[in-house]
Protein backbone atom coordinates (compact mmCIF):
# COMPACT_ATOMS: atom_id res chain seq x y z
CA UNK A 1 0.00 0.00 0.00
CA UNK A 2 1.52 3.32 -1.08
CA UNK A 3 2.13 5.85 1.69
CA UNK A 4 -0.08 8.86 1.08
CA UNK A 5 -0.33 11.93 3.29
CA UNK A 6 -2.87 14.72 3.56
CA UNK A 7 -2.51 17.20 0.68
CA UNK A 8 -0.60 14.75 -1.51
CA UNK A 9 -1.64 14.79 -5.15
CA UNK A 10 -2.24 11.30 -6.47
CA UNK A 11 -3.46 9.96 -9.78
CA UNK A 12 -6.36 7.56 -10.15
CA UNK A 13 -6.18 6.48 -13.77
CA UNK A 14 -5.73 9.78 -15.56
CA UNK A 15 -7.43 11.93 -12.91
CA UNK A 16 -5.37 13.86 -10.36
CA UNK A 17 -6.79 14.03 -6.83
CA UNK A 18 -5.87 15.72 -3.56
CA UNK A 19 -5.80 13.56 -0.44
CA UNK A 20 -7.87 15.29 2.29
CA UNK A 21 -8.01 12.56 4.93
CA UNK A 22 -6.18 13.26 8.18
CA UNK A 23 -2.81 11.61 8.75
CA UNK A 24 -3.94 10.88 12.33
CA UNK A 25 -6.41 8.18 11.25
CA UNK A 26 -5.28 4.54 11.25
CA UNK A 27 -4.43 3.09 7.82
CA UNK A 28 -7.38 1.82 5.80
CA UNK A 29 -7.65 0.31 2.30
CA UNK A 30 -9.64 3.42 1.26
CA UNK A 31 -8.65 7.07 1.48
CA UNK A 32 -10.68 10.29 1.05
CA UNK A 33 -9.78 12.45 -1.95
CA UNK A 34 -11.07 15.35 -4.02
CA UNK A 35 -10.59 15.29 -7.82
CA UNK A 36 -8.71 18.03 -9.67
CA UNK A 37 -10.45 18.85 -12.95
CA UNK A 38 -9.65 21.29 -15.73
CA UNK A 39 -13.24 21.99 -16.77
CA UNK A 40 -15.15 22.06 -13.48
CA UNK A 41 -17.34 25.15 -12.79
CA UNK A 42 -15.62 27.03 -9.98
CA UNK A 43 -17.29 28.80 -7.06
CA UNK A 44 -14.92 31.09 -5.17
CA UNK A 45 -13.42 29.45 -2.05
CA UNK A 46 -15.34 26.19 -2.59
CA UNK A 47 -13.32 25.33 -5.71
CA UNK A 48 -9.82 26.83 -5.49
CA UNK A 49 -7.36 26.42 -8.34
CA UNK A 50 -4.52 24.04 -7.51
CA UNK A 51 -1.22 24.13 -9.37
CA UNK A 52 -0.05 20.73 -10.61
CA UNK A 53 2.34 19.76 -13.37
CA UNK A 54 2.41 23.25 -14.87
CA UNK A 55 -1.39 23.38 -15.01
CA UNK A 56 -4.00 25.10 -12.90
CA UNK A 57 -6.76 22.63 -12.04
CA UNK A 58 -10.00 23.19 -10.12
CA UNK A 59 -10.57 21.36 -6.84
CA UNK A 60 -13.96 19.71 -7.46
CA UNK A 61 -14.86 19.75 -3.77
CA UNK A 62 -18.43 18.48 -4.19
CA UNK A 63 -17.03 15.33 -5.82
CA UNK A 64 -15.26 14.28 -2.61
CA UNK A 65 -15.00 10.50 -2.47
CA UNK A 66 -13.18 7.54 -0.98
CA UNK A 67 -11.06 5.44 -3.33
CA UNK A 68 -8.92 2.38 -2.88
CA UNK A 69 -5.49 3.45 -1.74
CA UNK A 70 -3.96 0.72 -3.93
CA UNK A 71 -5.47 2.44 -7.02
CA UNK A 72 -3.59 5.69 -6.37
CA UNK A 73 -0.08 6.75 -7.36
CA UNK A 74 1.49 9.77 -5.63
CA UNK A 75 2.58 12.40 -8.17
CA UNK A 76 3.01 15.58 -6.15
CA UNK A 77 1.87 17.74 -3.28
CA UNK A 78 -0.57 20.58 -2.70
CA UNK A 79 0.79 21.24 0.81
CA UNK A 80 1.65 24.81 -0.19
CA UNK A 81 -2.09 25.32 -0.79
CA UNK A 82 -3.27 23.48 2.34
CA UNK A 83 -5.20 26.50 3.62
CA UNK A 84 -7.25 26.77 0.42
CA UNK A 85 -8.01 23.03 0.38
CA UNK A 86 -9.00 23.02 4.07
CA UNK A 87 -11.19 26.10 3.58
CA UNK A 88 -12.97 24.41 0.65
CA UNK A 89 -13.76 21.31 2.76
CA UNK A 90 -14.94 23.54 5.63
CA UNK A 91 -17.28 25.40 3.25
CA UNK A 92 -18.60 22.11 1.86
CA UNK A 93 -19.32 20.69 5.32
CA UNK A 94 -20.34 23.82 7.20
CA UNK A 95 -21.43 26.27 4.55
CA UNK A 96 -19.10 28.96 5.85
Image (tube, rainbow, N blue to C red):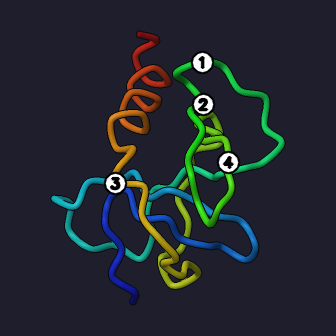
Label 4: which secondary element: strand
Query: In the image as oriented, which residue stretches furthest toward the right?
Result: 39
Label 2: which secondary element: loop
Pick whichever of labels 4 and 3 is earlier in the sequence: 4
Residue 53 lies, in percent from the top left, at 62, 66
Pick whichever of labels 1 and 3 is earlier in the sequence: 1
The residue lying at 27 percent from left, 74 percent from top is: 27
The residue lying at 55 percent from left, 24 percent from top is: 46
The residue lying at 54 percent from left, 82 percent from top is: 73
Q: Gap between marks 1 and 2, in whole Å?
A: 6 Å
Q: Gap between marks 1 and 4, in whole Å?
A: 14 Å
In this picture, residue 24 sits left or right of residue 76: left
Label 3: which secondary element: helix
The residue tagged 1 is 44
Who is closer to the viewer here, 51 or 19? 51
Residue depth check, mark 2 versus mark 3: number of the one nearer the observer: 3
Query: In the image as oriented, which residue stretches furthest toward the front?
Result: 54
Pick whichever of labels 2 and 3 is earlier in the sequence: 2
Find out whether the residues at labels 1 and 2 contact each other: C-beta distance under 8 Å.
Answer: yes
To which quarter of the image does residue 15 belong?
bottom right
Mark 4, other Cα within 10 Å: few <14 / some 14–19 / many ≥20: many
The residue tagged 3 is 79
Who is closer to the viewer here, 50 or 17? 50
In this picture, residue 49 sits left or right of residue 38: left
Pick whichever of labels 4 and 2 is earlier in the sequence: 2
Mark 3, other Cα within 10 Å: few <14 / some 14–19 / many ≥20: some
Q: In this rendering, is residue 67 above or below 89?
A: below
Residue 38 lies, in percent from the top left, at 78, 48
To which quarter of the image does residue 84 belong?
top left
Find out whether the residues at labels 1 and 4 contact each other: C-beta distance under 8 Å.
Answer: no
The residue tagged 4 is 57
Amino acid sequence: MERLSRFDIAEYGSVAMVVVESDLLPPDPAIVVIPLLSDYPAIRSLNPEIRHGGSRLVLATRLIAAVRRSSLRRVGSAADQADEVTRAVDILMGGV
